[in-house]
Image (cartoon, rainbow, N blue to C red):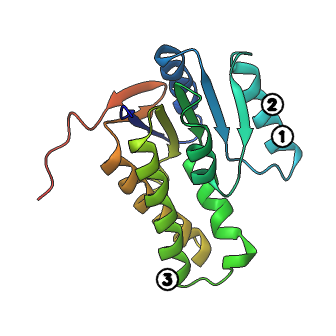
Amino acid sequence: MQEGKLTLVLGGTRSGKSSFAEKLAQGLGDRVLYLATAAVYDEEMAQRVKEHRRRRPASWVTIEETIDLAKVVEKYAQEYEVILIDCLTLWLTNLLLREAQSDMGSVKEAFILQEVEKVAELCQNTAANVIIVSNEVGLGIVPDTPMGRQFRDLAGAANQIMARYAKAVYLVIAGLPVELKALALPMK
């Protein structure tokens, strides 16, 4: 099996990260799987999903999976040239809120980060090119609730895990993508 390329695309809300990731995917192959992680609970979120669907080429296959990303990546990686996962932070939200793991302690955080590591490893080792979109949430104000702070911390840790496995990491600000991994200093 030829190893694929894992790319992480980070950015804030409405930064252009999803549009950029979609353009990357279009340039990497014709057989694209769009793996959507959003759980739709209200009309506003339904409109966001509708807008994302409208932008995508009709030839792309979409699978909606809110919890078990590893299962979908493992199952479909050989069928597609590109897998675009949008987005990591919505998936983290789903895991954080899942009733089966309802405690707020470090056990839940460890479980979630193990899942992130599992997905990162699968994505790095698959034959497909995998693009993962994620929000950079640590640049704003400190959340005023324990769960908000837990989510912010989990997102930061998850982004670091993905960045470690990724061959390329982009930060999109105001629609401008900057490749970070090539600019990064080595960590000791």
Which mark sits nearer the N-terminus, 2 or 3?
2
Image height check: is 183 above or below 144?
A: above
Left or right: 179 in relation to 147: left
Check disc 2 and report the residue beneath it: 50
- The CA distance from mark 2 to mark 1 is 6 Å
Q: Is residue 75 visible?
A: yes
- Dot label at residue 46: 1
Q: Which residue is mark 3?
A: 106
- Quadrant of the drawing holding the N terminus: top left
- Residue at image position (58%, 78%) is 146
Which tag is nearer the camera, tag 3 or tag 1? 3
* Amino acid type at image mark 1: Ala
- For the residues labelled 3 and 1, the Cα–Cα distance comes to 32 Å
Viewer can see residue 16: no
Q: Residue furthest front?
A: 1
* First reached walking from the N terminus: tag 3 or tag 1: 1
Please say if the residues under marks 2 and 3 sit with CB atoms less than 8 Å apart: no
Q: Using the numbered discs, state the Cα–Cα distance from disc 2 to disc 3 in whole angstroms.
A: 36 Å
Q: Nearer the viewer, residue 69 or 75?
A: 75
- The residue tagged with tag 3: helix, strand or loop? helix
Q: Secondary structure at mark 2?
A: helix
User: Which residue type does callout 2 highlight?
Assistant: Lys
Residue 2 coordinates in the image, percent (x, y): 36, 31
Q: Quadrant of the C terminus?
A: bottom left
Tag 1's secondary structure? helix
Q: Is residue 20 left or right of residue 67?
A: left
Q: Nearer the viewer, residue 140 or 176?
A: 176
Using the image, determine if residue 32 lies above or below residue 105.
above
Give me the residue at 34% from left, 29% from top.
178
